[in-house]
Amino acid sequence: MVAMTRRYLLTAALCWFVPTTTAWPRWKNLHLVPMAPDRNTTLEEVSDPMEQCFVELEFRAPEFNDHKTNHRTFEENEAVNLKVALGFIATALIAIGVSASTVKPKRLQKNVQFDSTKGTDVIDDGFDSARRTMESADLAFDGVKLTLTQKAKKNKDGSEQPATRLLLDGSLRGRARPGRMLAVMGPSGAGKSVFLHALAGRIKADKKLSLRGDRFLNLTLQPPSSILPAAFVEQEVNFFPRMTVRETVDFRVALHFGDLLGKASRDALVQDLLCQLGLLVAADTIVGDAKVRGISSGERKRLSIAVEMISSPGLVCCDEPTSSLDSAAAAVVIEKLRQLADQGKTVICVIHQPSSAIFGQFDDLLLISEGKQMYFGRTNKAKAYMEAQGYTANEDSGTAEHILECISPLPRQGESAEDAKQRLKNLGEAAVYQAEDLDLGIDHTDFMSTSNCSTKDCGTIGPRTSLWTQFCLLLHRASAETVRGKDVIFIKTVQQVVVASIYGGIYTLGDNQASILDRFGLLSLTAIGGTNMAIATTLRAFPKEKTIASAEIAIKQYRALPYFVAKAISEFPLVFFYNGVMGAILYFATGMNPGRFWTFIGLLTLHSLASEASGMAVGAVSPSSDVALAIFPAILILFVIFDGRNISTENTPWVLRWVSKISLIRWGFESFCLNEFQGLHFEASDASNGPVARTGEEALAMIGLKDSSIEGVVRAEVIITIVCWCLAYLGLTLTKQRFVVMEPKT
């Protein structure tokens, strides 16, 4: 945390120090000076003193503080105002960075005490009760039914498929008790994962889906929209790849407890979780992903369990925790879950083809095939149950292998397809008869009156931390992810150096008439290239990160607003660095207008920020990187076409005239031109038959920029950036995950 704070502050300080030292003399030399009323009039030409506009502040060096008049032109005041604005923006970012990086959660001494014998904080009973969302979880379910409504389709033989499909047929009935492990098994496509998600209230919302059933948690009927207070471990869990295992757990702990927990107690809790899940060896290793090498698959599974166990919930649901693991890693994961069950937790796992050792760890078993319940009861009685139904096992078959063969829709050895259907029908009918005698611990005549659970109480509660604390934690995580991507930083830096070197090797700007067109061409390429690289880079990265953030926001770990603000601010230092590298090489290698360097760097940075903001807006509403990148070429082509030079406003279709006002290439090109041509003079002796421009202002007038100003362009890009950020935030909010409501069983 300290190292990351120093890096961020150093980068932000450079962003502030350079324009400050080059554009601002000392504050004590601040004077109010007269300014000409428009761009084309000098102050000496104004005869009436009342027409002189005293609206500009001038910073004079000490040697000019005399009685002589020291007036600035309109363009000089524009340059000063721009640098002052950039300086204020950088200063504001520093203030935010300092506050966010140095804030510490307040420690509530009434809940946290210090143990001098151990040298750490000890959590008293009040805090312990706050951590334990539920000491035990007795979960019963009855009549879970999931229906998919679809359009009727004709089969090849001319018959029509039914318009509705039963994913879960409503026969599922059972109970998961504290201190026991329940295995949910069945063939592929049987509906195991769907059932677990339905039970936990985590089936993603879809208008085509209809869910019914009753869930009882500790003998209390759960409301339809309730998400069970459980540790829910998905089959595939994504983490930020460059965060270490310890930092990932610590981040979740800090978000969950907020100001309730001191630093020493938080570290002790993190250490305890890592120890319980066997992650101490990999504690300081980055998590990694498919592209970044990190921890192993087994360690990733255990990490996904660790972050869900922070609140010590009584119910643990795991969707195929052993998938893609070898037998040894799978055994370790199940062993850790067995330890949680022995501590009094209720553990429910979807298991696919377990080994005999893993199968023996479970106490209870639920068998599902084609959405129907085939068996519910003790694991050690499943084999005898199947044999009682007339389906004996081979001598060389294990129990798990045998029961999966019995409930498979595929024909067994010596069976026909009709025999397989009849077998599943018989087992389903027997399971319904068996389930009638199950004790769910519920008095059905009185459970509605005893239900005192509201949606707010039983569902997922909101974040326990303040918006400011959420922002600080998210800013630290975003900054760490950005800075630790050394390979990405290196590649992008090389990319900027190569592009700038190519431009510098091709263009040599002078003061002849030909150099006017060269300048226009160079600045146009700079605007197009900057827009292209900034948007494309954002579209490749942001949708993937949005997947992780959306899942965390859906379970209300934090709000969307602090995440988005932290994400936007964390990008600024590297954007300034990349553009500083490219701008420095490009500026001096091509011989651009001397004395306009820092304004050029500021405009280049602002242009990249606006392009990244537009990329975030597109990425926020796109379901994946592939979709976002498919949309990107059309956006770029529109920006190029409506850049202000390729088609006149008069000939533009009226329905598309608004595009030129949001074209980032147009505004970037205009800002670069206004900065570059200011104060330049060109030779007219080598003029050809074309128009001649002797000054930079005449050259700007040739392309219709006579009445434009840098301040106006900066204002337009700032507005575009803010609007794109707002659209991205709305897109992130509107596309957040929602879940299907479980209506009561009919």
Image: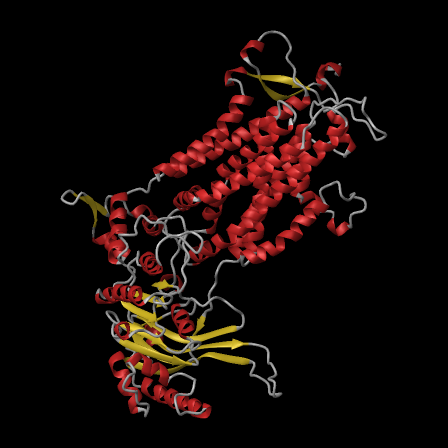
Q: Position of residue 595 (x, y in %)?
A: 62, 22
127 or 89: which is nearer to us? 89
Q: Residue furthest front?
A: 505
Residue 452, quarter of the rendered image: bottom left
429 or 681: which is nearer to us? 681
At 47% from the left edge and 51% from the top edge, which residue is drawn?
560
Which quadrant of the rendered structure holds the C terminus? Answer: bottom left
Which quadrant of the rendered structure holds the N terminus? Answer: top left
At 78% from the left edge and 47% from the top edge, which residue is drawn?
652
Q: Is residue 219 visible?
A: no
Q: Position of residue 416 (x, y in %)?
A: 44, 92
- Relative to 170, 588 lies left or right: right
At 42% from the left edge and 66% from the top edge, which residue is drawn?
202
- Relative to 376, 158 lies left or right: right
Please determine whether, in this image, residue 98 is positioned above or below residue 568.
Answer: above
At 58% from the left edge and 31% from the top edge, which residue is drawn?
585
Q: Residue furthest left?
A: 117
Q: Position of residue 352 (x, y in %)?
A: 36, 73
Q: Position of residue 14 (x, y in %)?
A: 47, 29
Please determine whether, in this image, residue 144 is positioned above or below residue 266.
Answer: below
Q: Is residue 653 visible?
A: yes
Q: How many marks?
A: 0
